[in-house]
Image: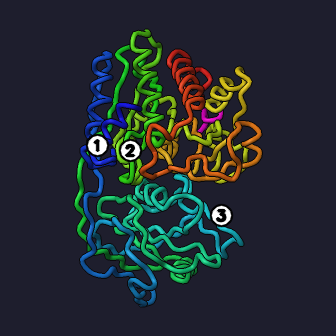
Amino acid sequence: MNALQSIATANGGTRAAGTPGYRASRDYVANKLRKAGYKVTLDPINFVQSWAENSPPTLTQTAPNSKAYVPNEDFFTFPPSPAGDVTAQVQAVDLTLPPAPTPSSTSGCETADFNGFVAGRIALIQRGTCPYATKVRNAGFAGAAGVIIFNEGQPGRTDAFTVDIGEWRAGIPMVFADFAVGNELAAAPGTTVRLKVDATLKLGTDHNVIAETRLGNPRNVVMVGAHLDSVPAGPGINDNGSGTAAILETALQMRLYPVRNKVRFAFWAAEEIGLLGSDQYVEGLSAAERDRIRLYLNFDMIASPNYAYKLYDGDNSDGEGSPAGPPGSAQIERQLANFFDRRGLGHVGTDFDGRSDYGPFIAVGIPAGGIFTGAEGLKTAEEQALFGGTAGVAYDVCYHQACDTTTNINATALDVNADAIADSVARFAFNTTAIP
């Protein structure tokens, strides 16, 4: 983490995607792994370098009726939507209409929401409880030719507006519409619309760092990941120099172990602008390559100053937000919990809310789990009783800020979680029989 801080300091205070600070971070990690004997690949990914809208978008019903919606009032282009002009039937995706009293829609949040979706249609998706980027990603996997996301419908959640979601799909125009537009289109199944976006999207290239053990069964891959980039505002030492450092040190310490299963360490690019590194990596895998990945472990922010030991809720026993992870996720959570239980340390669950790099793996059915110590959310009184710290204060008051430096970590949380990570990686490196 000191090395990552030095890199940021020498490069304008940041290690964000597309900056010299990110490239220096990439090279630092790759060189360490190469010297340790790993097979290292710099895996290219694209990110948005610039985006500009050339003219207002078009959203028009063409059949069975004709109606034009007002651009930049009834609907807005989703930056960074690529240019596209498609006329196709609209197909609703798991809508909650009329809307629930409180925000709760999971429309488009799961790949299963698109079961029965006809490729080439325009996906009509409702705003709700998961990131817009997750909905767009799943629509892309389902073969949508365009995406209309509309506001959910509760008071304060009816109007359209512009919001940069960081995610794009080649050739798929995307817009955000108000509730009235979405409700009207949903009420008339089979409606055909023309959706057009006129924009110029320029992409840059960064690299994931992928390192793989030379030994181990290549048909049984244990994958371990942490994002390497920071936000532009700061050096990102807790977010996510902490996870990066922990899995890098785990890799260096186990370099001589004759593992039974192949272990693949991933240091993701461009997580902070839409999970781009992990998303494009998973999308680029063949079905056979995905099938060889037995599980994915994700470590993002493991040393928050006002920490809680949070384990991803693989079995949905908390009953909050997203459903359980793919089969095997519960067993991952249990193994991590065993580490804390054996040491008499408390732990709580945290929802698979789609905000970190496990998202693309879950989307294709790969079981996942991991540790998280909290971001901008406020610590509860119950968590204060378990972990100490201060209730009612953010887990990380420097989240996504310039003050996320080497002074912004809790050494106890870092030490405990680094051991938990090493423990889980080593156990799965030798034995995955608990995973279906």
- Amino acid carrying mark 3 in the image: Ser
Disc 1 is placed on an element classified as: helix
Q: Is residue 209 magenta?
A: no
Q: Position of residue 365 (x, y in %)?
A: 52, 41
Question: Pointers 1 and 2 in contact (CB under 8 A)?
Answer: yes
Q: Quadrant of the C terminus?
A: top right
Q: Which mark is residue 173?
A: none
Circle 2 sits on which residue?
235
**Residue for badge 1:** 21
Our reading of the magenta stretch's main secondary structure is loop
Left of 392 or right of it: where is 199? Answer: left
**Cα distance between the residues tagged 2 and 3:** 34 Å
Residue at x-position 51% and y-position 73% = 150
Q: Are marks 1 and 3 in contact (CB under 8 Å)?
A: no
Numbered disc 2: secondary structure: loop
Which quadrant of the figure contains the N terminus? top left
Tell me the magenta residue range: 326-330
Specify few, some or many for label 1: CA neighbours under 10 Å numbering under 14, 14-19, or 20 or more: many
Q: Secondary structure at mark 3?
A: loop
Left/right placement of residue 246 relative to residue 204 reads right
Pick the front one: 314 or 31 = 31
Q: Report, in whole angstroms, how far the alpha carbon at label 1 lies from the one at label 3.
A: 39 Å
Disc marking residue 104: 3
Q: Who's the residue at 48% across and 38% down the image?
A: 407
In the figure, is residue 184 to the left or right of 169? right
